Image (tube, rainbow, N blue to C red):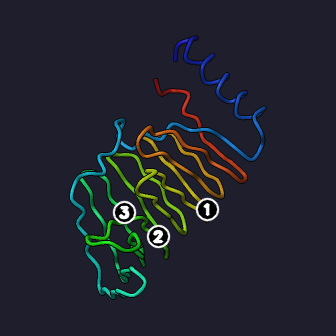
Amino acid sequence: MTFRHLIRTAALAIALAICHPATAQVGIGFGGVAHDADQPVEVTADSLSIDQTNGRAVFEGNVIIVQGDLRMAAGRVEVVYSEGGEGRAVEEVIASGGVLVTRGTDAAEGAEARYEITAALLTMSGDVMVTQGATAFAGDSMIINMTTGNGTLDGRVRTVLDPGAD
């Protein structure tokens, strides 16, 4: 380990310690580049129910959603469509029952997740754990901008720093 790397690791540890104790800003690029939300979405589940009156579709049982190299797995996923007009667009995806989101080797897991399509914001809650290689972050909740990769982890934030990583 180089002296410069040791200084960077120490500086990060100090910054995390003196920041607001319940919040940490993390770079979670999920693969290092912006997510392309224009790619087709493939959904697999044990069952699907659709309610045209309220513009919702509910996938239940071993739900897997794949869009490009972004993958979400959950016990239940509700898809909320926009109001009125022809060709309703997906506004929001709400997942529960243990949620795992992966892209490449990056992963985030929690009890629930909400993905706001237009804003490209992924909000996860319930014992959130994020792993990127040897680095791990944990907290009560997290918000990630899937376009920029910037995120905020809230709650009792914990991390493990790998002093041997570059």
Residues tagged 1 and 3 counted as in contact (Cβ below 8 A) = no
* Amino acid identity at mark 2: Ile
Distance from Cα at disc 1 to Cα at disc 3? 17 Å
Q: Say which label, 1 or 2, has the lower sequence index.
A: 2
Residue 72's mark? 3
Residue 12: x and y in percent read 64, 27
Identify residue for label 2.
94
- The kind of secondary structure element at disc 1 is strand
Residue drawn at x 25%, y 75% is: 44
- The kind of secondary structure element at disc 3 is strand
Q: Is residue 25 left or right of residue 32?
A: right
Residue 13: x and y in percent read 68, 30
Q: Nearer the viewer, residue 41 or 9?
A: 41
Quadrant position of residue 49: bottom left
Q: Nearer the viewer, residue 22 or 55?
A: 55
Q: Is residue 59 above or below residue 131?
A: below
Q: Is residue 87 left or right of residue 9?
A: left
Distance from Cα at disc 3 to Cα at disc 2? 11 Å
Residue 57: x and y in percent read 36, 80
* Amino acid identity at mark 3: Met
- Dot 3 alpha-carbon crowd within 10 angstroms: few under 14, some 14 to 19, many 20 or more: many
Q: Say which label, 3 or 2, has the lower sequence index.
A: 3
- The kind of secondary structure element at disc 2 is strand
Identify residue for label 1.
127
Residue drawn at x 33%, y 45% is: 35
* Amino acid identity at mark 1: Asp
Residue drawn at x 34%, y 86% is: 52
